Each structure stands twice: as structure tokens, then as C-alpha cells.
Image (cartoon, grey):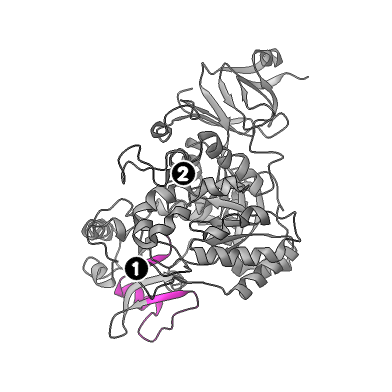
Amino acid sequence: MAASDLVLLNGIVHTMDQAKPRASAVAISGKRIQAVGDEEVRDLAGPMTRILDLEGRCVIPGLADSHIHFAHFALTLRQVNLVGTTSLREAMERVAARVSQTPEGEWVQGHGWDQERWAERRFPTAIDLDAVAHQHPVTLMAKSGHAAVANSTALRLAGIDEHTVDPAGGRIERSSDGQPTGLLFDAAMRLLYDAIPRPDSGQLAAILPEAMGRAQKLGLTALHDMDDVVAFDAYQCLHAEGRLGLRIVKYVQAAELEHVLALHLRGGFGDDWLRLGGIKVMSDGALGPRTAAMLDPYLGEPENHGLLIYTLEELTDIVCRAAAGGLSVAIHAIGDRANRVALDALAAVAAFPRLRHRIEHVQLLAPEDVGRLAKLGIVASMQPLHATQDAPMAERYWGQRCQYAYAWRSLLEAGTILAFGSDCPVEDLNPFLGLQAAVGRFSAELRPAGKAWYPEQRLTAQEALRAYTWGASYAVGMEDRLGSLTPGKLADLVVLDRDILTVEPQAIGETKVLATIIGGQVVMSDGL
């Protein structure tokens, strides 16, 4: 056997390989794992081998974010950050500060507001924005990504007025006299954002590396991106230049389905750095703006069942056309009604077992639907931070139904494959916060430390880590080359400052990544 290029010794190695779950050493040759074992791995070192003594530090497979809007995240790094604001006034002060620094007439964009965390607990309006921005068009995206607010200037530039008709799957909030209040929900947001000059693929490619560097520092080595085709183009530009710092599996929106089918592109087309995943379909809205589609109405809102973007017949048609063309489908479904419709639609393509269909979020299920994902072979692509961040809001609007909300344990015991992610920029990019949420199911910000929300749905650290590694790879048909530290697989691994499988749940979120290795190359090192 040829000498290794890199050997890691004296570590605590969690392989996620059921045949050999624990080791202390890893040897890497080229871009692949050569051997996993213990002291005998040292024998693979040659005179040119780099040897890294881990001194008892923890090693895990590279982490994958199974649901992320990464191009959107990169863009938010240049927007007004409203995450964590505790009042409408604080949010408007941040907007006013950016307006004062922006040339008159240029768009000001922000993101991350959450009215449920504000003292006023009400949605912002154009009147609020007009008070701090007279000469600038301003639009602010909600934390959920399913609501936006615009000032009067932005509404005028977008052509949104009392005569504008609500688009299918969306709603324009109106005052008693029929005038738009500035709030737009779900599909209606497109009316606004179509009016904003958008970066082209070259401009996006210029800002993505900064975001990729942030991801590498957090131990992320792969992403399943849910943004538009402009982002796909930007990733291709970076890949052609050898500057794609993460493995990207790209899902494209349902609006692009006919174009993809016309080109006869199938899921998996590409290579180990950039490939087509499948088609992303929106089924409903979100909990934050109360547009997630529900079987029963929201508590306190007897007329509100949310928004179902497609009928069952329409969604089934999309799913069947995609599957017939060799494309997996990832369906966004948050409310219990949306999840049922998604399951019913996916049942129609059970004859295509090679395809890895997914439901994104799976935030609320009716009890009788919990076992259906496993029976249909559908991956549950979920984001643990949604549970701990949404808990108070979910209890307020879903009540007792919450016992089947974010039901990781119930799904896992039913045989469902879990794939975890962040939904960043909706939630924090840091996967260790997601691992902590899955294991502890508590948030120090919302609950006394150690008090779990529906603790029966917690996972072990091993199970949660598997969802961020092997499960994520399985979801995109790459478990034969990623997701575990197994000889022959691609050498994507992360060195940590603690053993996340044995520390208390409260300590998982404080984990520091000491090194990130992708394809045998150390792409980030900090203190190692």
C-alpha cells in the first residue's frame, strides 16, 4: 500500500460507519480515506507524509447542511441585520442608520425580523418604514422568509396598489379601505422582489467565497442549496475557476422544471463538487406569518387555515413529471395539511425507487401521517433549530398539536431517514447549534436551561450527528462516497475541540472547529 499523504493519530474518531464506529487514527491518500483504525495506521506514513497528532481531540465526518439558501445568506451579509431585535423601534433604528449611509434613491434591504419576538408583537407596515425612509425604497424580509414589508416608495416602484390582485399562493395585506399596508406574504413577495435590481451570477460569485469561508470555519463541507438558477450559475463559475470551497448539491425551483426536462438533465448530473439534486417545490407558507397550511385552524384565528400553494392534483402533476424525467423532488411542507398533501402526491411516484424524494421541514404532522414517510421511502429533511426557536410560537398557534411537531424521535422510530440542516439565513448557519437543539430540545433564550420542549422527541448525539452526515449524503444519493469515515470514501472530515457525543447537550453549541478537511486538503485550520 502506498504511503499516505496525511495521517491523523491519537484522536477520538467517530466514523459514522456502523462496521467500525470508533477509531483513533485516519490515513488519507490523495482525496480519499486510505485507512481508519488505531496505532497500526501509523505504519502507512512515509518520509513525505504529514503526521498530525490530535492529542485526544475529536474527529467526525464533514458536516452537510441539507437545506440552506446559501446565496441568499451571502447576500444578507450586506443587508440590514434585524435578527435578534426585541422591538419594532429597535428594528426601525437599524434601518434608519443604514438609510443615512445610502445614496438617495438606492434600495435598502434588510432581513431577519420576527414580530413574535418584539414587545409589540405586531407586523411592521409601510407607515413604520416611511417614518425612517422617505427617499429610499426599503424592503425587509421576515426571519421566516415567508413575509416581507415594504415602504411606500418600494410599493410604488413595484406597482403594488389597491388594484393589484393577490397572486395564487400569496396575499397582500390591506387596510379597511383596500390600500396595501406594505405587508406581503408568500407568493405576493415576488411582486416586490421582481422590482429590485438583482445581482447577476458574476456579482454573486464574487461574494460567495466569503460565505463559504464562514461555513468551513463551522465544519461544513457540503450544502444542499435551495436558491435560484442564478446561484447555480454562480457556483458553476466558481467551480470552473477551482474556487468552489464546498461541495454543492443544487436544487432548482419548480418554475424551472420544464427547462430542466427539456435539457434532459437528471438528478445527480455533475461531479463530487457540484451536481444537480432535483426540483424544489413550495407547498405552503410558514408558521411565523401563519401561512402554513393546516387541517384545523390556528388557535385564536378560526378562519385561518394558512395557504396551500398547489392543489393535490397540481402538486401530483409536478411530482410525476419530475420523477418521469429522473428528477427527485424536495417539497417544502410545514403545516399538517401541507405535509399530508405532499405525502399523497409523493405516493404517486413510488414506482421510481431510485429517486430520493424529500419533504423539507416536516414541522407538523397529523398522528396518522407520522409513519407514512418511511413507508413511502421519503427522507425527512428537517432543521432542529426551528423547534427550539419556534416553540413559544408553535404553542401559541398550534396548541396540543405540538406533540407531533418537529417529531424527530417518532419519525426515526418509524424508520424514516433524517437529514438535518439549518434553513439559513432563517436560522443560524452553525450546525453545532442544530445538533444541540436536536439533543437537548431546549433554548437557553426561551426556556430554563435543561428543560426540554416535548423531551420525548429528543435524539441522542449519535443519531443527530448521523442526520448531519450519513443521512444528508443518503438524501442526495451520495452515501457511497460521503457521510462516513470509511476507506475509499472522499476525505471530508472535521477536527473538534471536544467530543460532541459525550459532552452535556448545553456544551455542544459551544464547540470550536479546529480544522476542516475537504477532499484530503486542509481548507481551514484554527489552533491545530
Instruction: From the image, tell me which residue sits under label 2.
Output: 456
Spatial CA span between label 1 and label 2 = 38 Å
Q: Residue at x 71, y 28 (%)?
A: 487
Instruction: From the image, tell me which residue sits under label 1.
Output: 149
What amino acid type is highlighted by mark number 2? Glu
Q: Residue at x 66, y 31 (%)?
A: 18
Residue 102: x %, y % from top left: 30, 60
Total label count?
2
Q: Nearer the viewer, residue 343 or 42?
A: 343
Observer able to see residue 468:
yes
Observer able to see residue 143:
no
Residue furthest to the right in view is 1
Residue 166: x %, y % from top left: 44, 80
Magenta stretch encompasses residue 298: no
Q: Nearer the viewer, residue 142 or 15?
A: 15
Q: Is residue 127 left or right of residue 501?
A: left
What amino acid type is highlighted by mark number 1? Val
Classify 390 as above or below 528: below
Q: Earlier in the sequence, mark 1 or mark 2?
A: 1
Secondary structure found at label 2: helix
**Disc 2 packing (10 Å; few <14; some 14–19; many ≥20):** few
Classify 509 as above or below 170: above
Residue 222: x %, y % from top left: 58, 43
Q: Quarter-wise, where is residue 372 in the image?
A: bottom right
Q: Nearer the viewer, residue 397 or 310?
A: 397
Q: Residue at x 44, y 27 (%)?
A: 503
Of labels 1 and 2, the one closer to you: 2
Classify 126 as above or below 413: below
